[in-house]
Amino acid sequence: MAVQHSGKLLFLFGLVVNVLGNNDSKVIGGQLANVIKFMVSVQQYAEHHCGGSLVSLSNVLLACHCLSRLNQFQKLVNVTDPKVYRVVAGHTDLETTSEYQQIRGVKSLLKHPRCSLYGGIPKFDLALIVTKSAFRRSENVKPIGLYSMNKKSYEERIAQITEKTSCWSAGWGMTKKFGVGMSRYLKYLIMRFVPYSKCKASLSAIDARFKTFNMIKNGYICFEGAYKSETVFAGDSGGPLVCERQLIGVTSLVLNSTINCLTVFAKVSEFTEWYGGIAHRSVDSSAPVPQIGLVFLVMINLVDIEML
């Protein structure tokens, strides 16, 4: 299979409105979504940054790399001040407000203890935001229940997913690959499971680092848009992957090439036991985000990695 070297691995948080590359104006697609009760917009400096999922009325599951942003040197650095963030629930339009909308400040930011980089590729791309006060349960705001708090049981459920399983993802991400900003409205798209062998082959063909990267052990599962013209993209990071009404994954990164648009999701099964250990524990809002010794870089050898 011929591969164009202009392909890039994209982290999908929503800070950049232009993507470097050839001018491809292909519509990414998806459909306008009604309110997804557990879905939130995680915002930095009052602007949409990532999606997230309410797993309780005060806890938001999202991607580890969402607790970062690009600095003036185009390097991805940790953003550890909870005051920078806010979480918006109950409303699908980023440019208006409504009586159903709820906004909460952030108390604490917690990265999964195994969140790290493998040659520039993230592992266990999971994190938790604790809000200052709980959201109010309403007709537009309701947490999504986790399939199990036991990792083994969750993994067994994920292992049942096939190419025929009904799955979807959602977000406020870009509606075109180049030259446009985030979607004003929440959109969703139908996703289809991609077996590990096919996913690894596709990723390895465009970036040699994936030849030695163990997708399964590092907490990932792969999907693609059910329609080839559709994919998640910049601004969709942290959002949910749902299969048969169960939260299965967190949007992490996408293979951006002219051949296909595989999306890599962090598995929620890798979140549950860690979350179970901290969910009922008071978290000090002044405590810093665990840094894990990381300074994320935008440009890495072999193939460009753009943090979006």
Image (cartoon, rainbow, N blue to C red):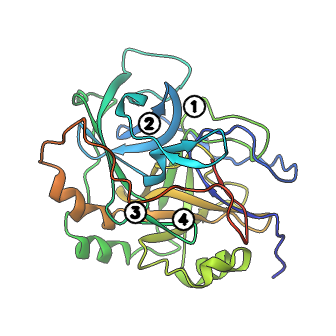
At a point 44% along the width and 27% down the height, the residue shown is 91
Q: Earlier in the sequence, mark 1 or mark 2?
A: 2
At a point 52% along the width and 37% down the height, the residue shown is 49
Q: Within 10 Å of the Cα at label 3, are there few (<14), some (14-19), or many (20+) other Cα atoms?
A: many
Real-space Cα separation, disc 3 to disc 1, in angstroms: 30 Å
Disc 4 residue type?
A: Val
The answer, for residue 243, to whether it is visible in the render is no
**Residue tagged 4:** 264
**Direction from residue 298 to residue 56 in the image, left or right:** left
**Residue tagged 1:** 185
The percent coordinates of residue 297 (x first, y second) are: 60, 56
94 is higher (above) or lower (below) than 280: above
Q: Within 10 Å of the Cα at label 2, are there few (<14), some (14-19), or many (20+) other Cα atoms?
A: many
Q: Quadrant of residue 7?
A: bottom right
Real-space Cα separation, disc 3 to disc 4, in angstroms: 15 Å
Q: Secondary structure beneath disc 1?
A: loop
Q: Earlier in the sequence, mark 3 or mark 4?
A: 3
As drawn, the label of residue 42 is: 2
**Residue tagged 3:** 115
Real-space Cα separation, disc 1 to disc 2, in angstroms: 14 Å
At a point 35% along the width and 66% down the height, the residue shown is 114
Q: Secondary structure beneath disc 3?
A: loop
As drawn, the label of residue 259 is: none
Real-space Cα separation, disc 2 to disc 4, in angstroms: 20 Å
**Direction from residue 180 to residue 114 in the image, left or right:** left
Real-space Cα separation, disc 1 to disc 4, in angstroms: 23 Å
At a point 24% along the width and 35% down the height, the residue shown is 285
The label nearer to you, 1 versus 4, is: 4
